[in-house]
């Protein structure tokens, strides 16, 4: 079975600072993908960043980057220069051949 | 805008009733996925269809069923509704849905179901 664990239910950060959200996972599949989704108060699920497990290089998308540690099955999200619009629930997700398995989420609040 | 549409946005109904949620995938996407987001269970995968055929099943109750039509839109049918079925139901779509395929899923805005 595939599992995803986000150990931080809530986090807060000051505007312009950097914050890291943690995620660990477990899977027996060799081909898989990892994702971070953002869910703002509007409830829309927005893909923030993705990482192919076969790639060693960490993915980066503007202010968002990941630290992918395959052996440790860890996939953390770093948000640099935090903005008020980053306030949202963040879900780590593991995608294999079929479905996405989500963690319980981390509620991030960016304070002015 | 992800390109995935879901109707209705909100649905309020009573226990014991039956409802149908509709999803239209992005143009060109063959796979449709249904997820349920509730406060206590988080985001849970329900079922996947690929080009009209059921591909994978998750934690979907027997009271729930789904189908994907020739035009690739999908419907999720929920029957004998209970209070605990109140949740946000998401549809997502992707281009393909097979082993070793790139599996990026694009989510619709969701349908909020309230069972009274």
Image (cartoon, rainbow, N blue to C red):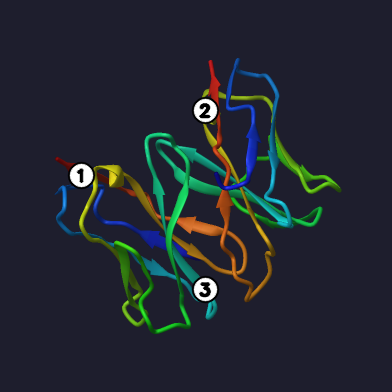
Q: Chain of mark 1?
A: A
Q: Quadrant of residue B74?
A: top right
- Report the disc number at residue A32: 3
Residue at point 48%, 65% (across, down):
A2
Q: Nearer the viewer, mark 2 or mark 3?
A: 3
Q: Quadrant of residue A34?
A: bottom left
Task: Return the residue at label 2.
Answer: B86
Q: Are marks 2 and 1 on the same chain?
A: no
- Report the disc number at residue A110: 1
CA gap between label 1 and label 3 equals 31 Å
Q: Chain of mark 2?
A: B
- Report the disc number at residue A35: none
Q: Secondary structure at mark 2?
A: loop
Determine whether label 1 and label 3 are within 8 Å by CB.
no
Using the image, determine if residue A107 lies above or below residue B83: below
**Residue A43, x across and y down, in percent:** 44, 37
**On the rendered structure, is B28 left or right of B107?**
right
Q: Secondary structure at mark 1?
A: strand
Q: Nearer the viewer, mark 1 or mark 3?
A: 1
Neighbourhood count class around disc 1 (C-alpha, 10 Å): few under 14, some 14–19, many 20 upward:
some
């Amino acid at each position: 079975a595939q599992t995803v664990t986000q150990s931080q239910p809530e986090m807060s950060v000051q505007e312009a600072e950097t914050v890291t959200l943690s995620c660990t996972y477990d899977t027996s599949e060799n081909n898989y993908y990892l994702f971070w989704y953002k869910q703002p108060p509007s409830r829309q699920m927005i893909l923030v960043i993705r990482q192919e497990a076969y790639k060693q290089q960490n993915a980066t998308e503007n202010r968002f980057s990941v630290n992918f540690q395959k052996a440790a099955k860890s996939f953390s999200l770093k948000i640099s220069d935090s903005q008020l619009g980053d306030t949202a629930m963040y879900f780590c997700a593991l995608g294999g051949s079929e479905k996405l398995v989500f963690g319980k989420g981390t509620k991030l609040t960016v304070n002015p | 805008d992800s390109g995935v549409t879901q109707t209705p946005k909100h649905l309020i109904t009573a226990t014991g009733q039956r409802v149908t949620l509709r999803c239209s995938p992005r143009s060109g996407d063959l796979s449709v996925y249904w997820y349920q987001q509730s406060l206590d269970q988080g985001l849970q995968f329900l079922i996947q269809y690929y080009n009209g055929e059921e591909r994978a099943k998750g934690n979907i109750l027997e009271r729930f069923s789904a189908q994907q039509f020739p035009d690739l839109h999908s419907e999720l049918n929920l029957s004998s509704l209970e209070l605990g079925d109140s949740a946000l139901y998401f549809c997502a779509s992707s281009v393909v849905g097979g082993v070793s395929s790139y599996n990026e899923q694009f989510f619709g805005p969701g349908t909020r179901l309230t069972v009274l």
